[in-house]
Image (spheres, rainbow, N blue to C red):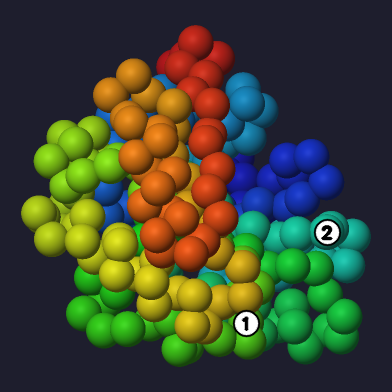
């Protein structure tokens, strides 16, 4: 049975699509059919906003609600906005975060970030590489060689509309973590290194 909402620690994660603009070789979805050997994140179909809200239940139970599953949430921009509005309408709410690869503006061909102002409280944006050459190699972007610059531009623009922005990278052998840390510092955003647990994910 497909999983739309799943807990990780105290937070609740929302799996709203399996579509993605990248085909990263390191991605968990390429390593395991189930997340943490428990949650089946491969969707039979994409859920509606109402179905996602039903899966959430009472949002006030969680410190954060995070758009992050086996796909890029922002390819379903209208659904993200609808869900966030429904959560916000309930009064004091948890932090609403999006984990994204940062190609949303490139995908939509416009600046989508103003549409998220007041709805999304935080973003974690995957930088994944210190330059375009490595990014193209490890992320295999479907949107082409413009993707890396588009991610950098997305990060810069996101600061204007989203209160908390974090850039992340995996600690892969080919990634220059310190160079990525400097990029984040130059962009004026937080930085986090994500551990890579390849051995934990098996098909």
Residue 80: where, in percent of width, then height?
A: 53, 73
| Between 101 and 6, the one nearer to me in the picture | 101
The residue at the point 29 percent across, 70 percent down is: 153
- Counting the numbered discs, the total is 2
* Crowding near the residue tagged with mark 2, few <14, some 14–19, many ≥20 C-alpha atoms within 10 Å: some
Give coordinates of residue 45: x percent, y percent. 44, 56
Question: Hey, which quadrant is residue 203 in on the image?
Answer: top left
| Residue position for label 2 | 63
Q: Is residue 7 above or below residue 202?
A: below
Q: Is residue 111 above or below residue 167?
A: below
**Residue, x 37% and y 43% (percent of image)?**
180
Q: Decide which of 76, 177 is in the foreground and name it.
A: 177
Residue 6, can we see it?
A: yes
User: Tag 1: Cα neighbours inside 10 Å, few (<14), some, or many (≥20)?
Assistant: many
Q: Quadrant of the N terminus?
A: top right
Q: Secondary structure at mark 2?
A: loop
Which residue occupies the foreground of this view, 95 or 37?
95
Q: Residue furthest top?
A: 199
Instruction: Indicate which disc, 1 or 2, sits on the residue closer to the N terminus.
Output: 2
Picture quadrant of residue 187: bottom left
**Residue 45 seen by the camera:** no
Spot the residue most to the left: 145
Q: Are marks 1 and 2 in contact (CB under 8 Å)?
A: no
Q: Which residue is mark 1?
A: 119
Residue at 43% of width from left, 54% of height from top? Answer: 184
Which mark identifies residue 11?
none
Asked if 181 appears above or below 89 in the picture, the reply is above
Secondary structure under the numbered disc 1 in the rendered image: loop
Q: Position of residue 35 (x, y in %)?
A: 57, 31
The x and y percentages for residue 173 are 34, 19
């Amino acid at each position: 049975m497909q999983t739309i909402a799943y807990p990780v620690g105290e937070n609740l994660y929302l799996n709203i699509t399996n579509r993605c603009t990248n085909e990263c070789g390191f991605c968990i979805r390429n390593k395991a059919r189930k997340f943490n050997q428990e949650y089946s994140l491969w969707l039979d179909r994409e859920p509606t906003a109402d179905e996602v809200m039903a899966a959430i239940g009472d949002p006030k139970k969680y410190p954060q609600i995070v758009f992050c599953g086996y796909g890029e949430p922002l390819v379903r921009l209208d659904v993200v906005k609808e869900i966030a509005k429904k959560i916000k309408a309930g009064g004091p709410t948890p932090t609403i975060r999006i984990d994204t690869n940062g190609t949303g503006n490139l995908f939509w061909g416009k600046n989508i970030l103003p549409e998220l102002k007041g709805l999304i409280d935080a973003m974690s944006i995957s930088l994944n590489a210190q330059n375009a050459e490595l990014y193209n190699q490890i992320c295999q972007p479907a949107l082409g060689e413009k993707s890396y610059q588009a991610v950098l531009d997305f990060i810069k623009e996101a600061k204007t509309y989203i209160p908390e922005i974090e850039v992340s990278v995996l600690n892969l052998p080919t990634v220059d973590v310190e160079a990525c840390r400097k990029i984040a510092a130059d962009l004026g955003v937080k930085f986090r290194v994500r551990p890579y647990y390849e051995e934990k994910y098996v098909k």
